[in-house]
Protein backbone atom coordinates (compact mmCIF):
# COMPACT_ATOMS: atom_id res chain seq x y z
CA UNK A 1 0.00 0.00 0.00
CA UNK A 2 1.49 3.32 -1.04
CA UNK A 3 0.93 6.15 1.41
CA UNK A 4 2.32 9.60 2.10
CA UNK A 5 2.10 12.14 4.89
CA UNK A 6 0.38 15.44 4.21
CA UNK A 7 -0.18 18.46 6.42
CA UNK A 8 -3.85 19.42 6.60
CA UNK A 9 -5.26 22.17 8.84
CA UNK A 10 -2.30 21.88 11.18
CA UNK A 11 -2.39 18.09 11.41
CA UNK A 12 -0.25 15.45 9.73
CA UNK A 13 -2.35 12.80 8.00
CA UNK A 14 -1.36 9.70 6.09
CA UNK A 15 -3.21 9.41 2.79
CA UNK A 16 -2.94 6.20 0.81
CA UNK A 17 -3.33 4.76 -2.69
CA UNK A 18 -3.86 8.11 -4.41
CA UNK A 19 -3.55 6.43 -7.83
CA UNK A 20 -6.28 3.85 -7.09
CA UNK A 21 -9.14 4.20 -9.59
CA UNK A 22 -12.41 4.59 -7.65
CA UNK A 23 -14.65 5.32 -10.68
CA UNK A 24 -13.58 2.93 -13.46
CA UNK A 25 -16.04 4.38 -16.01
CA UNK A 26 -14.23 7.74 -15.92
CA UNK A 27 -10.85 6.65 -14.56
CA UNK A 28 -11.31 8.99 -11.58
CA UNK A 29 -8.71 8.25 -8.90
CA UNK A 30 -8.74 8.51 -5.13
CA UNK A 31 -6.32 11.43 -5.44
CA UNK A 32 -8.82 13.28 -7.65
CA UNK A 33 -11.62 12.55 -5.15
CA UNK A 34 -9.53 13.96 -2.29
CA UNK A 35 -8.62 16.96 -4.46
CA UNK A 36 -12.32 17.62 -5.16
CA UNK A 37 -13.18 17.63 -1.44
CA UNK A 38 -10.19 19.85 -0.55
CA UNK A 39 -11.00 22.30 -3.36
CA UNK A 40 -14.65 22.54 -2.28
CA UNK A 41 -14.08 22.47 1.48
CA UNK A 42 -15.33 26.06 1.83
CA UNK A 43 -18.67 24.93 0.37
CA UNK A 44 -19.14 21.57 2.12
CA UNK A 45 -17.78 22.30 5.62
CA UNK A 46 -20.64 24.71 6.53
CA UNK A 47 -23.13 22.05 5.32
CA UNK A 48 -21.52 19.41 7.57
CA UNK A 49 -20.98 21.64 10.61
CA UNK A 50 -22.47 20.26 13.85
CA UNK A 51 -24.27 17.44 12.03
CA UNK A 52 -23.38 13.80 12.87
CA UNK A 53 -21.99 12.33 9.64
CA UNK A 54 -23.03 8.95 8.23
CA UNK A 55 -20.65 7.72 5.56
CA UNK A 56 -21.06 5.27 2.70
CA UNK A 57 -17.64 3.79 2.01
CA UNK A 58 -16.34 2.32 -1.24
CA UNK A 59 -12.73 1.46 -0.26
CA UNK A 60 -12.11 -0.45 -3.51
CA UNK A 61 -14.16 1.81 -5.80
CA UNK A 62 -17.75 2.05 -6.96
CA UNK A 63 -17.80 -1.31 -8.77
CA UNK A 64 -16.77 -3.15 -5.57
CA UNK A 65 -18.81 -3.73 -2.37
CA UNK A 66 -19.68 -0.74 -0.20
CA UNK A 67 -20.96 -0.31 3.34
CA UNK A 68 -22.72 2.23 5.56
CA UNK A 69 -20.86 3.50 8.59
CA UNK A 70 -22.52 5.64 11.24
CA UNK A 71 -20.27 5.06 14.22
CA UNK A 72 -16.75 6.40 14.60
CA UNK A 73 -14.35 4.44 12.35
CA UNK A 74 -12.15 1.91 14.14
CA UNK A 75 -8.71 3.38 14.76
CA UNK A 76 -9.99 6.96 14.56
CA UNK A 77 -7.41 9.41 15.96
CA UNK A 78 -8.12 11.03 19.33
CA UNK A 79 -8.30 14.47 17.70
CA UNK A 80 -11.24 13.53 15.41
CA UNK A 81 -14.31 15.35 16.79
CA UNK A 82 -17.19 13.11 17.80
CA UNK A 83 -20.61 13.20 19.39
CA UNK A 84 -22.68 10.50 21.10
CA UNK A 85 -26.38 10.83 20.39
CA UNK A 86 -29.49 8.78 21.23
CA UNK A 87 -30.54 6.34 18.50
CA UNK A 88 -34.01 5.09 19.51
CA UNK A 89 -35.30 2.32 17.29
CA UNK A 90 -31.79 1.47 16.08
CA UNK A 91 -31.73 -1.62 13.83
CA UNK A 92 -28.83 -2.92 15.94
CA UNK A 93 -30.59 -2.35 19.24
CA UNK A 94 -28.22 0.35 20.45
CA UNK A 95 -29.51 3.23 22.57
CA UNK A 96 -26.71 5.57 21.49
CA UNK A 97 -24.13 5.86 18.72
CA UNK A 98 -20.93 7.87 18.55
CA UNK A 99 -20.66 9.67 15.22
CA UNK A 100 -17.78 11.70 13.84
CA UNK A 101 -18.27 15.43 13.38
CA UNK A 102 -16.54 17.22 10.51
CA UNK A 103 -15.39 20.54 11.92
CA UNK A 104 -12.42 21.24 9.66
CA UNK A 105 -10.52 20.11 6.58
CA UNK A 106 -8.42 17.57 8.52
CA UNK A 107 -11.55 15.66 9.65
CA UNK A 108 -12.93 15.77 6.09
CA UNK A 109 -9.71 14.44 4.53
CA UNK A 110 -9.41 11.75 7.20
CA UNK A 111 -12.90 10.35 6.42
CA UNK A 112 -12.58 10.65 2.62
CA UNK A 113 -9.21 8.85 2.73
CA UNK A 114 -11.10 5.84 4.17
CA UNK A 115 -13.13 5.63 0.95
CA UNK A 116 -16.08 7.67 2.29
CA UNK A 117 -17.37 8.89 -1.06
CA UNK A 118 -20.85 9.81 0.24
CA UNK A 119 -21.46 11.95 3.32
CA UNK A 120 -25.02 11.94 4.70
CA UNK A 121 -26.39 14.21 7.44
CA UNK A 122 -29.66 14.71 9.36
CA UNK A 123 -31.75 17.90 9.21
CA UNK A 124 -30.68 18.81 12.76
CA UNK A 125 -27.46 19.86 14.45
CA UNK A 126 -25.97 19.34 17.90
CA UNK A 127 -25.19 22.22 20.26
CA UNK A 128 -21.83 22.92 21.91
CA UNK A 129 -22.61 20.24 24.53
CA UNK A 130 -23.40 17.63 21.88
CA UNK A 131 -27.15 17.71 22.51
CA UNK A 132 -29.35 17.24 19.40
CA UNK A 133 -31.38 20.36 18.60
CA UNK A 134 -34.71 20.69 16.77
CA UNK A 135 -34.24 20.62 12.98
CA UNK A 136 -32.94 23.85 11.47
CA UNK A 137 -34.22 22.95 8.01
CA UNK A 138 -36.94 21.03 6.22
CA UNK A 139 -36.11 18.84 3.25
CA UNK A 140 -38.47 17.89 0.43
CA UNK A 141 -36.93 15.00 -1.50
CA UNK A 142 -38.02 14.75 -5.15
CA UNK A 143 -37.65 11.16 -6.35
CA UNK A 144 -38.52 10.53 -10.02
CA UNK A 145 -40.33 7.31 -10.87
CA UNK A 146 -39.70 5.33 -14.08
CA UNK A 147 -40.14 7.57 -17.13
CA UNK A 148 -39.63 10.78 -15.13
CA UNK A 149 -36.42 12.74 -14.71
CA UNK A 150 -34.99 16.12 -13.83
CA UNK A 151 -37.39 17.94 -16.17
CA UNK A 152 -40.34 16.67 -14.11
CA UNK A 153 -38.41 17.28 -10.89
CA UNK A 154 -37.90 20.90 -11.95
CA UNK A 155 -41.63 21.36 -12.59
CA UNK A 156 -42.49 19.95 -9.17
CA UNK A 157 -39.69 21.93 -7.49
CA UNK A 158 -41.34 25.18 -8.65
CA UNK A 159 -44.68 24.06 -7.20
CA UNK A 160 -43.02 23.28 -3.85
CA UNK A 161 -41.06 26.54 -3.89
CA UNK A 162 -44.15 28.65 -4.52
CA UNK A 163 -46.16 26.85 -1.85
CA UNK A 164 -43.43 27.30 0.78
CA UNK A 165 -42.74 30.90 -0.22
CA UNK A 166 -46.42 31.61 0.43
CA UNK A 167 -45.83 30.73 4.11
CA UNK A 168 -42.58 32.66 4.31
CA UNK A 169 -40.09 29.84 3.73
CA UNK A 170 -37.35 30.33 1.16
CA UNK A 171 -35.98 27.18 -0.50
CA UNK A 172 -32.77 26.18 -2.21
CA UNK A 173 -32.62 23.42 -4.83
CA UNK A 174 -29.94 20.71 -5.00
CA UNK A 175 -29.63 18.13 -7.77
CA UNK A 176 -28.95 14.96 -5.78
CA UNK A 177 -26.13 13.49 -7.86
CA UNK A 178 -28.26 10.34 -8.14
CA UNK A 179 -31.67 10.60 -9.86
CA UNK A 180 -33.63 13.48 -8.39
CA UNK A 181 -33.45 16.68 -6.38
CA UNK A 182 -33.76 17.93 -2.82
CA UNK A 183 -35.25 21.25 -1.75
CA UNK A 184 -34.11 22.72 1.57
CA UNK A 185 -36.02 25.34 3.55
CA UNK A 186 -34.30 26.95 6.53
CA UNK A 187 -36.25 26.84 9.80
CA UNK A 188 -35.91 28.72 13.08
CA UNK A 189 -35.36 25.49 15.01
CA UNK A 190 -38.48 25.71 17.16
CA UNK A 191 -40.41 22.70 15.83
CA UNK A 192 -39.72 19.01 16.41
CA UNK A 193 -38.76 16.61 13.62
CA UNK A 194 -42.23 15.04 13.87
CA UNK A 195 -43.89 18.43 13.40
CA UNK A 196 -41.69 19.24 10.41
CA UNK A 197 -42.43 15.82 8.90
CA UNK A 198 -46.15 16.53 9.33
CA UNK A 199 -45.86 19.83 7.47
CA UNK A 200 -43.89 18.19 4.65
CA UNK A 201 -46.41 15.35 4.42
CA UNK A 202 -49.35 17.77 4.24
CA UNK A 203 -47.56 19.71 1.49
CA UNK A 204 -46.90 16.52 -0.49
CA UNK A 205 -50.50 15.33 -0.16
CA UNK A 206 -51.84 18.73 -1.18
CA UNK A 207 -49.67 18.80 -4.32
CA UNK A 208 -50.68 15.21 -5.14
CA UNK A 209 -54.31 16.29 -4.97
CA UNK A 210 -53.71 19.32 -7.21
CA UNK A 211 -51.36 17.59 -9.70
CA UNK A 212 -52.21 13.86 -9.66
CA UNK A 213 -50.59 13.34 -13.08
CA UNK A 214 -47.22 14.65 -11.84
CA UNK A 215 -46.94 14.15 -8.06
CA UNK A 216 -47.40 11.30 -5.62
CA UNK A 217 -47.02 11.50 -1.85
CA UNK A 218 -47.07 7.73 -1.43
CA UNK A 219 -44.09 5.40 -1.52
CA UNK A 220 -45.94 2.61 -3.35
CA UNK A 221 -43.84 1.78 -6.42
CA UNK A 222 -46.89 0.98 -8.55
CA UNK A 223 -48.13 4.57 -8.22
CA UNK A 224 -44.91 6.16 -9.42
CA UNK A 225 -44.31 5.69 -13.19
CA UNK A 226 -43.94 9.12 -14.83
CA UNK A 227 -44.41 10.90 -11.49
CA UNK A 228 -42.30 12.54 -8.83
CA UNK A 229 -42.54 11.03 -5.36
CA UNK A 230 -42.39 13.80 -2.76
CA UNK A 231 -40.59 11.98 0.04
CA UNK A 232 -41.58 13.92 3.15
CA UNK A 233 -40.29 11.16 5.47
CA UNK A 234 -36.67 12.30 5.15
CA UNK A 235 -37.47 14.81 7.92
CA UNK A 236 -37.64 11.95 10.44
CA UNK A 237 -34.96 12.63 13.08
CA UNK A 238 -33.40 9.20 12.48
CA UNK A 239 -33.01 9.73 8.72
CA UNK A 240 -30.33 11.49 6.72
CA UNK A 241 -29.98 13.02 3.27
CA UNK A 242 -26.93 13.37 1.06
CA UNK A 243 -24.94 16.44 2.11
CA UNK A 244 -24.89 19.19 -0.55
CA UNK A 245 -21.51 19.13 -2.38
CA UNK A 246 -20.94 15.44 -1.47
CA UNK A 247 -19.90 13.01 -4.16
CA UNK A 248 -22.09 10.01 -4.97
CA UNK A 249 -21.09 6.38 -5.40
CA UNK A 250 -22.57 6.10 -8.90
CA UNK A 251 -20.86 4.88 -12.09
CA UNK A 252 -19.67 8.45 -12.72
CA UNK A 253 -18.37 10.84 -9.99
CA UNK A 254 -21.59 12.85 -9.70
CA UNK A 255 -22.09 15.54 -7.07
CA UNK A 256 -25.08 16.64 -4.97
CA UNK A 257 -24.92 20.15 -6.39
CA UNK A 258 -26.74 23.29 -5.20
CA UNK A 259 -28.46 25.02 -8.14
CA UNK A 260 -29.79 28.44 -8.98
CA UNK A 261 -33.55 28.86 -9.34
CA UNK A 262 -33.14 30.31 -12.85
CA UNK A 263 -31.60 26.95 -13.90
CA UNK A 264 -34.56 25.08 -12.43
CA UNK A 265 -37.05 27.44 -14.10
CA UNK A 266 -35.34 26.97 -17.49
CA UNK A 267 -35.37 23.18 -17.02
CA UNK A 268 -39.08 23.22 -16.14
CA UNK A 269 -39.79 25.19 -19.33
CA UNK A 270 -37.70 22.77 -21.41
CA UNK A 271 -35.20 25.51 -22.29
CA UNK A 272 -32.34 23.78 -20.46
CA UNK A 273 -31.58 20.10 -20.02
CA UNK A 274 -30.65 19.75 -16.37
CA UNK A 275 -28.25 16.86 -15.72
CA UNK A 276 -26.51 15.44 -12.67
CA UNK A 277 -23.14 17.19 -12.63
CA UNK A 278 -19.81 15.36 -12.26
CA UNK A 279 -16.73 16.68 -10.48
CA UNK A 280 -15.28 17.76 -13.85
CA UNK A 281 -18.39 19.86 -14.58
CA UNK A 282 -18.48 21.32 -11.07
Image: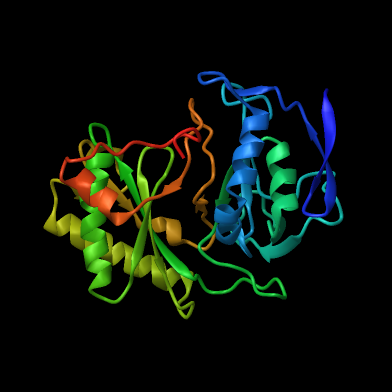
Where residue 20 appears, x then y in whole percent?
69, 22
Q: In this orientation, does residue 253 appear? A: yes
Q: Residue at x 46, y 40 (%)?
A: 282
Relative horizontal placement of residue 97, taking residue 216 as reference (left or right): right
Number of on-image labels = 0
Q: Residue at x 40, y 70 (%)?
A: 196
**Res. 74 image quadrant:** top right
Q: Residue at x 61, y 57 (%)?
A: 45
Relative horizontal placement of residue 144, taking residue 77 as reference (left or right): left
Where residue 239 appears, x then y in whole percent?
51, 55
Q: In this orientation, does residue 217 appear? A: no
Colour scheme in use: rainbow
Vertical side of 179 occupied by 135: above or below:
below
**Res. 151 image quadrant:** top left
Vertical side of 26 occupied by 220: above or below:
below
Q: Nearer the viewer, residue 146 or 17?
A: 17
Where residue 129 appears, x then y in whole percent?
72, 75
Relative horizontal placement of residue 87, taking residue 227 as reference (left or right): right
Give the position of the N terminus as an image quadrant: top right
Amino acid sequence: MSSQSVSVAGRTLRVSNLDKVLYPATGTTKGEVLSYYVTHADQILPELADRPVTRIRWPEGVEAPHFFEKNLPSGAPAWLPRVTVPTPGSSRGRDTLTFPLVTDLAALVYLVNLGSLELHVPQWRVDADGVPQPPDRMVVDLDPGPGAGLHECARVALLVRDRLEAVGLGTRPVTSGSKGMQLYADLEGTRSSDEVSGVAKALAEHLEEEHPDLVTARMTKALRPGKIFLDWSQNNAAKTTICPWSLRGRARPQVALPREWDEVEAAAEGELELTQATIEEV
